[in-house]
Image (spheres, rainbow, N blue to C red):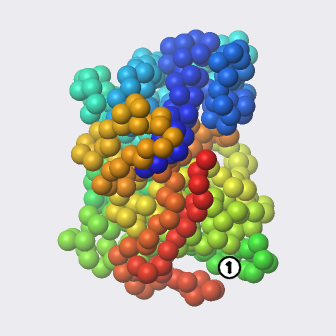
């Protein structure tokens, strides 16, 4: 891990601490989006007024976003042992539990707060995705601090996600509704929308670690959101890709969900082998072929730059839900370079080809015995290199700044060149037009073939 990578991680985490500390309320909350001129993108000027860097442009507060700040700061604390990151992560987690825990049989945490022009007003829905994020965040803090509060938070989130299993549909529901008049939470499923990430992120988090349900949830993904799609590349050539829709009934491959689906198929394939080796192999094959799609999109996609990943493939965008307007029915992802899609692609390739379990942003990083402890002088030196035996992914997964997506991941390692070392994939479900259907150990995937800074 280079000093440049650590420097970038520090700048991101310092920004997360800053926006939390300088929020107008100051109790651990932070907003969905801020002025783009901030310490992440330019040198921080301590003489500038605080609101120059921390003026929100989207005041909504989402539980999932806050949970990923906790994950980012918790992981960075484990690397640096600088208390300010753990302090800020703890403040955020305490805010969530104090303000958003729902006292209903299904448990869980509400969606967050929205700004009514004068104050923050609670959002009544509960999101499966948000509670998955929060479970992982609380588990990380519990592993660091052994504070029983975080064990309680894990239990509250887990109770909710377990209650999202729909035995009839054989998938996890996207979340719950709120009362139309009071906006208060109610224990009633949202039956309008069905999401890929409610299945795949649940699997990656181990929040409801039930192999039968995991398998059925991936079969649901396979049947309802896994698709092939042709798209013209930057040279006008039509190519075929394998990926997932954002949700059932949506349109167009969405690459962020596609990457996390590759990871989920790979994870379940490993645990399923002894029970059902045939299905295990098929899941391995799917994960490998989806991973190839990620490398092909990186290389060929229109609007790509050979490094990042676009959010979607079609010019009309990837629509997340069917035609109804409920819960953002018109929300789309477009074929432009996208931080979350790029980050999840980097994580997926590292997870699949290196077997790096900590490339999974939901993995319990506090249990990683190979965490390289960084001396303060080493982390800021321009000349020294930090050596470590395991090329771990310090996954600084930060909040989404662009939409109501709960995750905007930034893989600080950014995987400069990956030597592909996958399981041997067989029986590919389809052929790419250029006949690149699998990766062999001799192949090389370049995710970021340049200096970071």
Rendering quarter of residue 33: top right
Residue 301 % position (x, y): 70, 69
The residue positioned 79% from the left and 78% from the top of the image is 236
Vertical side of 194 occupied by 327: above or below: above
Vertical side of 452 occupied by 348: above or below: below
Give neighbour class at mark 1: few <14, some 14-19, many 20+ (Cα, 10 Å): some
Residue 245 % position (x, y): 59, 61
Residue 140: tell me if it is visible: yes
Residue 264 % position (x, y): 40, 60
Residue 39 % position (x, y): 64, 30
The residue positioned 43% from the left and 44% from the top of the image is 384
As drawn, is 181 to the left or to the right of 430? right
Q: Residue furthest left?
A: 274
Q: Which residue is mark 1?
A: 239
- The one nearer the camera, 422 or 317, is 422
As drawn, is 358 to the left or to the right of 180? left
Rendering quarter of residue 270: bottom left
């Amino acid at each position: 891990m280079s000093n440049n990578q650590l420097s970038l991680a520090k700048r991101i985490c310092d920004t997360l601490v800053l926006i939390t500390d300088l929020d107008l309320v100051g109790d651990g909350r932070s907003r969905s989006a801020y002025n783009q001129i901030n310490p992440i993108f330019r040198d921080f000027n301590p003489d500038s007024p605080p609101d120059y860097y921390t003026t929100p442009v989207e005041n909504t507060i989402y539980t999932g976003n806050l949970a990923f700040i906790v994950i980012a700061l918790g992981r960075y604390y484990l690397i640096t042992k600088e208390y300010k990151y753990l302090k800020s992560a703890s403040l955020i987690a305490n805010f969530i539990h104090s303000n958003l825990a729902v006292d209903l049989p299904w448990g869980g945490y509400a969606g967050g707060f929205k700004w009514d022009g004068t104050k923050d007003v609670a959002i009544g829905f509960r999101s499966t995705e948000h509670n998955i994020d929060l479970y992982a965040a609380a588990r990380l803090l519990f592993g660091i601090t052994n504070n029983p509060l975080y064990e309680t938070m894990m239990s509250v989130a887990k109770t909710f996600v377990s209650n999202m299993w729909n035995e009839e549909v054989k998938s996890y529901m996207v979340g719950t509704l709120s009362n139309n008049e009071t906006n208060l939470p109610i224990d009633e499923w949202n039956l309008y929308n069905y999401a890929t990430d409610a299945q795949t992120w649940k699997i990656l988090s181990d929040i409801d670690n039930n192999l039968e349900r995991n398998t059925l949830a991936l079969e649901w993904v396979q049947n309802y959101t896994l698709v092939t799609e042709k798209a013209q590349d930057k040279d006008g050539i039509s190519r075929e890709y394998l990926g997932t829709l954002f949700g059932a009934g949506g349109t167009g491959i969405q690459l962020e969900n596609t990457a996390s689906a590759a990871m989920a198929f790979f994870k379940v394939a490993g645990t399923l082998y002894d029970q059902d080796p045939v299905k295990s192999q098929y899941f391995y094959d799917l994960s490998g072929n989806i991973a190839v799609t990620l490398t092909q999109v990186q290389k060929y996609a229109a609007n790509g730059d050979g490094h990042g990943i676009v959010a979607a493939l079609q010019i009309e965008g990837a629509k997340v839900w069917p035609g109804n307007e409920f819960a953002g029915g018109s929300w789309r992802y477009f074929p432009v370079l996208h931080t979350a899609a790029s980050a999840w692609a980097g994580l997926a390739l590292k997870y699949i080809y290196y077997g790096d379990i900590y490339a999974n942003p939901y993995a319990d990083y506090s249990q990683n015995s190979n965490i390289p402890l960084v001396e303060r002088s080493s982390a800021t030196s321009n000349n020294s290199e930090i050596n470590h035996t395991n090329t771990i992914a310090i996954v600084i997964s930060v909040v989404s700044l662009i939409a109501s997506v709960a995750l905007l991941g930034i893989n600080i390692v950014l995987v400069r060149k990956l030597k592909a070392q996958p399981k041997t994939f067989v029986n590919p479900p389809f052929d790419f037009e250029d006949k690149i259907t699998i990766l062999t150990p001799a192949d090389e995937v370049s995710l970021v073939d340049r200096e970071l800074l």
